[in-house]
Amino acid sequence: MQSEYRNIYQIARESAGITQEKAAELIDVSVESLRAYETGRRYPPNDVVLRMIEIYGTQYLAYQHLRNSAEIGRKILPEIELKDLPTAFLNVLNEVNAFVRQKDRMIDITCDGVISEGERPEWNHIMLEMDRLSASLMALKFAKVKPD
């Protein structure tokens, strides 16, 4: 198991300022089970992770759990880097601008419903741009916001 995966539940709990004992009580699991999730000895079931998200107040835990606990999450969800709100927003704007620059070429490639062999390399490049846009949007969603 990756060390990041082993620690995501503990990091979320500690960020919420909740002890293991109190978290276990609120989540309705034993302290031993919570400790096993936080040390990576066991994977928490999705219903337990949902309760953690609600109690700890962190949607980002859901994203991390899906990326780290299932092959489909690793393949489909882009890796994101948490940033402060202004940086995350500027990254989204930058990626949107990159998308707009590709828009006309996307229309040319897709209007016939076929991506030819000759178009495939350019289309793959455009899809990488789209992945970067998706990642920047998720980073904005989970951006670190300064408290009031």
Image: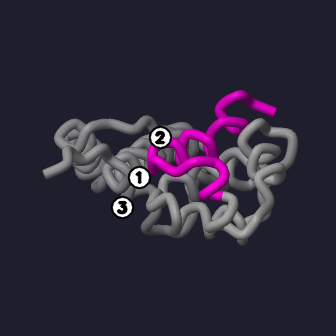
Horizontally, residue 147 falls left or right of residue 79, namely left
Identify residue type, mark 2: Ile
Residue behind mark 1: 138
Q: Nearer the viewer, residue 10 or 96?
A: 10
Q: Earlier in the sequence, mark 2 or mark 3?
A: 2
Task: Please state which of the two labelled residues, at mark 3 or mark 1, is closer to the viewer.
Answer: 1
Instruction: Tell me which segment is drawn in magenta.
Output: 1-23
Q: Earlier in the sequence, mark 3 or mark 1?
A: 3
Residue 89 appears in the rendering: no
Residue behind mark 3: 107
Expressed as whole percent of the image width and height from the top left, the position of residue 112 reads: 49, 68
User: Residue pushed farthest front?
Assistant: 21
Question: Does the residue at mark 1 contact the one at mark 2 (Cβ under 8 Å)?
Answer: yes
Examine the image and state in which quarter residue 141 appears: bottom left
Residue 12 forms part of the magenta stretch: yes
Identify residue type, mark 3: Ile
Task: Please state which of the two labelled residues, at mark 2 or mark 3, is closer to the viewer.
Answer: 2
Quadrant of the rendering where the N terminus is positioned: top right
Residue 70 forms part of the magenta stretch: no
User: Residue sitting at 82 percent across and 44 percent down?
Assistant: 36
Expressed as whole percent of the image width and height from the top left, the position of residue 7 reads: 65, 36
Mark 2: which secondary structure?
loop
Residue 81 sits above or below residue 135 on the image: above
Identify residue type, mark 1: Met
Q: What secondary structure is the stretch in magenta mostly built from?
A: helix
Other residues around mark 1 within 10 Å, as few (<14) / some (14–19) / many (≥20): many
Other residues around mark 2 within 10 Å, as few (<14) / some (14–19) / many (≥20): some
Residue behind mark 2: 80
User: Residue sitting at 26 percent across and 38 percent down?
Assistant: 84
Q: Could you tell me how far apart the alpha carbons at marks 1 and 2 are, in whole angstroms?
A: 7 Å
User: Residue sitting at 28 percent across and 55 percent down?
Assistant: 104
Q: Nearer the viewer, residue 45 or 17?
A: 17
